[in-house]
Amino acid sequence: MTLAGRRVVITGGSGGIGATIAQEVVDRGGTVLLVGRTESRLKDVAVALGPAAAYAVADVTDGAELTAALAGAGTIDHLVTAAAGGLAGPFAQLPEDDVRDFFETKFWGQYRAVRAALPRLAPDGSVLLFSGFLFRKPAAGLSAFAAVNGAIEGLVKVLAVEAAPVRVNALSPGRIDTLGGGEPMPVGARREYVAMAGTEAVLGRIGTAAEAAHAAVFLLENGYTTGVTLDVDGGLR
Ligand SMILES: NC(=O)c1ccc[n+]([C@@H]2O[C@H](COP(=O)([O-])OP(=O)(O)OC[C@H]3O[C@@H](n4cnc5c(N)ncnc54)[C@H](OP(=O)(O)O)[C@@H]3O)[C@@H](O)[C@H]2O)c1
């Protein structure tokens, strides 16, 4: 099952892995609806992708905005939920409100997108959720990521059963050369981060958005894969 002629909605499509997946979809003859909060970023990506791309400004923490954005998409073949924020800090010091805010984006944002898309998803279509390596790889200061990724992975198999024949999978990236829901780092800190990522991964380097998007395309296209969380992490786990 190819992506040619298929309509793919991508939350977090204005940057990082989501925008790279959008490029892969368009390269394969599909169309994309990019969803994000910042119109200028969405517009830049959509213009670069050409007429196969449209965008809708919506914050995944706002159910009404998200539902309106997806309603404008008509029938959806695939939903990709890449929008995420980030939160780091020792468990005992993280304010509970900050953890809740993070869950509003990365867990409830994906939950809401699926709820809004399910009634309009094509029976031979799919949902691609986003987890992350921190569920399997303990790292001090990143408990909120571990918990939210675990919650997403908990949903995947049950949703795959309930939504069938629509397929439901998740991608679990390792350290990838995108922002990971955070803010851009100063050049020196970024260089150190990339070097550290290289020492952690079995493959000795940070991953690329293209490598994550390649795995995403497999999960969207393969008609007999459902209920799977696929690690694309250079052996980091
Ligand atoms: N990169 C990594 O190393 C890594 C590792 C493990 C897991 N992951 C996971 O992979 C997924 C994609 O990460 P990434 O690195 O591509 O992130 P990214 O480069 O930071 O891009 C995030 C995208 O989400 C959008 N976004 C953020 N908050 C939003 C909100 N509330 N509503 C709508 N859109 C929102 C951003 O645009 P606006 O800010 O303009 O809205 C942007 O387009 C995330 O689930 C992340 O946790 C990434």
Image: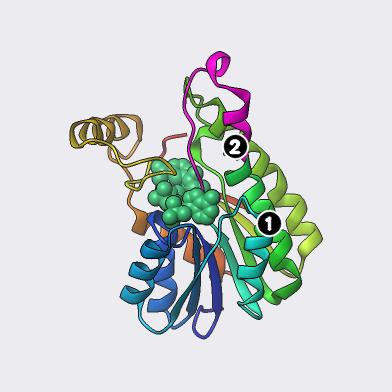
Q: Residue 100: within the magenta?
A: yes
* Residue at image mark 2: 101
Q: Residues within 10 Å of mark 2 (few under 14, many from 20)?
A: some
**Res. 28 mark:** none
The percent coordinates of residue 186 (x first, y second) are 23, 35
Q: Residue 99: within the magenta?
A: yes
Count the numbered circles shown: 2
Residue at the spot 66% in from the left edge and 47% down from the top edge: 108
Mark 1: C-beta under 8 Å from nearest atom of ligand 1: no
Q: Nearer the viewer, residue 11 or 229?
A: 11
Q: Amino acid at mark 1?
A: Gly
Q: Secondary structure at mark 1?
A: helix
Q: Which part of the image, by quadrant, shows the N terminus?
A: bottom right
| Left or right of residue 183, residue 226 in this image | right
Q: Amino acid at mark 2?
A: Asp
Mark 2: C-beta under 8 Å from nearest atom of ligand 1: no
| Left or right of residue 207, residue 233 in this image | right
The percent coordinates of residue 2 (x first, y second) are 52, 79
| Left or right of residue 8, residue 121 in this image | right
Residue bounds of the magenta highlight: 83-103
**Res. 63 mark:** 1
Residue at the spot 33% in from the left edge and 47% down from the top edge: 207
Q: Is residue 225 visible?
A: no
Relative to 220, does residue 171 appear above or below in the rendering? above
Q: Nearer the viewer, residue 53 or 205?
A: 53
Identify the mark nearer the N-term, 2 or 1: 1
